[in-house]
Image (cartoon, rainbow, N blue to C red):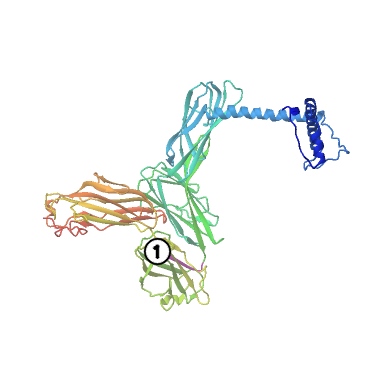
Amino acid sequence: MDMKNHEIKIKHDSSSLSEFVKRPLPNDEEVEAFDKYVVNEAKEEEIKNSLARIYQDDQGKKLDIKTLTVKRARGFFFNLVTFIIVMFVLSGAVYAAYNYIYLNINADKQTIVLSFAADREVMAGEEFYYILNYKNEDKVAINNIEIKVQYPDNFIFLESDPRATRNNNTWAMASLAPHRSDLIRIKGKLVGPVGESDIILADMTYKPANFSSEFKKSATFETKINDLGLNFSFSNSNSALVNEDNEIIVKFKVKDQNYLNNFRLTLEHPAEVEIINQAAGAATSAPAAPALQRGESAIPLIKPEGGAWFISNLEKNENEFKIKFKVREKKQPSVNLKIKFELPVEVKDQPTKYYLFHEKDLVYEIIKSDLNINIIINGSPIDQGVNFGQTLNYAINYANKGETLMKDVIIMAVLESDFLDWPSLIDGASGKVSDNTISWSKQEIAELAEVNSGAEGVIDFSLKLKAAAAVDLSKSYQVKSYVRYSVLGKSASGENQSNSIVNKINSDLNLVEQLRYFSDDNLAVGFGPLPPRVAQTTSLKVYWTINNNLHELNDLKISVTLPVNIRWGGKNRSSIGEVSYLSAANQVVWQIGRLPVTVYKADAEFNLDLTPAEADRNTIMIILPGTKIAAQDSETDMPINKTLKAKTSKLEDDNMASGDGVVQ
């Protein structure tokens, strides 16, 4: 715009503005100079701000720069130590990386394999093999190989293939080529208690061909002993009279599979207990061989030697023998006797080694009294199992072994149990019953008024156990019986007491047997004429039902031997175990074995065929002559044996069957 060609007229009241307008506009040089001035001013301001920040502390306050603090520089020694530490850390990191890369990664690849193969469970004394496999899966050979095996303590070494380099447990090999394998077969047997688990360990050391270092590989394997092949039971009292004969009845039965056909039996006892010598019949001090008496089933070979019995050539049926002992004095309230069963193994140039496979602790309360008094139940002074509903026949024997007369003797039988049927009591002496006791005084037995030195007598009574009922786990399923006495002026005490007998009640095992032609649904499960006819075949169904609630059972077996004219008809079924027919014995067997309490009911069935002969005409035939049930109670450690009533052609369990069962 050309300012000269225009006239501008402005009226202002303020003189200052008028003066400003009158000033000439700046030229280009003046504008450029002004811009440079502004830029320089901005730089100076930025420098000032930066310097201000340098001389501020962390809170933004200005520092006092008048005072100068000088820090000493780190010297050569510090730098040297720092260098050494850094190098040490780096070396450790390199070594750790080497170990990880070579050892761990290579180990994950399983370049060397060492492992066992064997049975997980074996019977005591059963021969078996440990197979030790070793394999080189590396690309190079391994040298200087040594394999050392550590056996379980109760392992009996028999042989190995290949033979050991030394000590029957160490094998040395020069080398093993890449991708090659081999094995060591070790034959032996384990002898120990049932349930014991034994671990074998193997260590293998070797050097890879491309390394100078020695490496190690290990392997383990666990084997459990699941059975002894023998069933043991012990009958004994839990108390012993001082200077009176006491006995332990040991029973054992060989199972179908058994590898312990010879063993040693020892009895550990304190000094006050003396074993009665069988041959002389007199007391002898240990370690004379204990007295041993043959039971009904004779053991083929029993050799007393050095305070022990060596038993061999066992028979399949139940074996029984007795140990007799006396307690010469009462040193303590009770004594502990330990019966041990061990397998002897001959070791070359060393003493015979014994392997323990079973033991039993028997604790006896020691009783010392002037009036010798003892109790016998069902003909035995020792603990034994009893069954629900069984009659207990008691005999209390008393004798004055002192030198003085005893007056006004009171004898009291204490019977502790929730399962005695007191209304069934039969007592010829009419003792007084109060709670769980029966007592006799001179009012009931005149001879108790005065018992002279050397005098003796017997009190007999009987009592039944209640029938089986619903299981109540809060109760103790047993009967504890003992006798106390008092004399004139003295009350009954622990010293005036007889032996005590604990009769544990066997499990409520029950077998229901039915012989039927028709089922519960009125369907025919048999065929043929009914009632039976001569020379014609009639098939009948047998039903077996087991109930058991109280204790676990072992070796449970039901069997029946059939009459001559009764034959197996098949069609068998069982919920557990197996029903089989033994043709040679014409016997039906339901073999169950172990029956836990969780299996409270089990059943089986099968058919029988009967073909009456002419001699059977107009008779009632016996079909099942008495089925037998046998088991071992795991709690009472006593056998359970029952025999059922015979079943006949009358078919007592079948309401639908017509006729009276008389053969036509």
Answer with the quarter of the image where residue 6 lies.
Answer: top right
Is 503 part of what is drawn in magenta? no
Q: Main secondary structure of the magenta part?
A: strand
Give the mark count: 1
Reply above or below: 553 against 187: below
Reply above or below: 106 against 647: above
Is 371 part of what is drawn in magenta? yes
Which region of the structure is painted magenta? 369-379
Left or right relative to 618: residue 370: right
Left or right relative to 75: residue 90: left
Q: Quadrant of the C terminus?
A: bottom left
Q: Quadrant of the N terminus?
A: top right
Q: Is residue 242 visible?
A: no
**Which percent across, then down, holds residue 615?**
13, 53
Residue most toward the right?
66
Q: Is residue 648 visible?
A: yes
Answer with the quarter of the image where residue 625 lies.
Answer: bottom left
Of residues 237 and 659, the one drawn nearer to the viewer in this rendering: 659
Residue most toward the bottom?
443
Q: Tag 1's secondary structure?
A: strand
Of residues 30 and 372, the one drawn nearer to the viewer in this rendering: 30
**Which percent across, then down, holds residue 602?**
32, 52
Of residues 390 and 343, the one drawn nearer to the viewer in this rendering: 390
Question: Circle 1 is placed at which residue position?
Answer: 377
Of residues 321 and 357, the one drawn nearer to the viewer in this rendering: 357
The amino acid beneath tag 1 is: Ile
Reply above or below: 509 against 372: above
**Which percent across, then down, holds residue 596?**
38, 52
